[in-house]
Amino acid sequence: MSINTSKHINHTKEEVEEYLNIVKRSVNAGKFVICTTAKNDKNRKFIEKYKLDSNKQKQMLIQLETTDFCYSADNYNDPQERLYFFCREYELNNWGTIEKVEVYIKIAIKKENFIVVISFHKPEKNIEKLFL
């Protein structure tokens, strides 16, 4: 069975700001996880490479802004859910060398506003931001 999914770019800044407010409140409350399973091995390797402890991960998510938003898309695993995609540049420590690193972040808000970060790594292709 194939599920049709769509990419959405018809968001207002206010909608994205409201979404980010939920994300930031949940992250501040510790209600978030960054997936590091075998399926999300890119996330685990990225976190290890830049020694991103849970406090740094939390700080990075809280720094997301409306201008970092790229698009949303239907989740092919759950058609009732929408995933939000962001890309932001951070200064990260790569074993003693500070690097400016673009980070691709894909987020889902689950029940009771629990945040699941599905992607947290360097982008694999060019990604355009919606609001510049």
Image: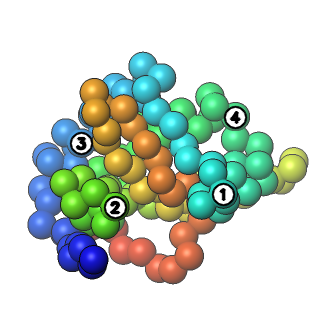
**For the point 31% across and 39% down, which residue is it?**
110
Q: Is residue 72 visible?
A: no
Q: Identify the residue position indicated by label 4 in the image.
A: 53
- Which SS class for mark 3? helix
Query: Do the residues bearing badges 2 and 3 touch, measured as CB atoms within 8 Å?
Result: no
Foreground residue, 106 or 17? 106
Q: Is residue 90 left or right of residue 79?
A: right
Q: Can you tell which quarter of the image residue 80 is in?
A: bottom left
Give whichever of discs 3 and 4 has the lower sequence position.
3
- Which SS class for mark 2? loop
Amino acid type at mark 1? Ala
Give whichever of discs 2 and 3 has the lower sequence position.
3
**Quadrant for the N terminus in the image:** bottom left
Q: Is residue 109 visible?
A: yes
**For the point 47% across and 47% down, which residue is it?**
117
Give whichever of discs 2 and 1 has the lower sequence position.
1
Q: Which numbered tag is attached to residue 38?
A: 1
Q: Nearer the viewer, mark 4 or mark 2?
A: 2
Amino acid type at mark 4? Asp
Amino acid type at mark 3? Tyr
* Location of residue 128 in the rendering, given as x and y in whole percent from the top left corner: 36, 74
**For the point 54% across and 70% down, which residue is it?**
123
Q: Nearer the viewer, mark 1 or mark 3?
A: 1
* Location of residue 115 in the rendering, given as x and y in whole percent from the top left corner: 39, 37
Q: Identify the residue position indicated by label 2 in the image.
A: 77
Q: Identify the residue position indicated by label 3 in the image.
A: 19
Give whichever of discs 4 and 2 has the lower sequence position.
4
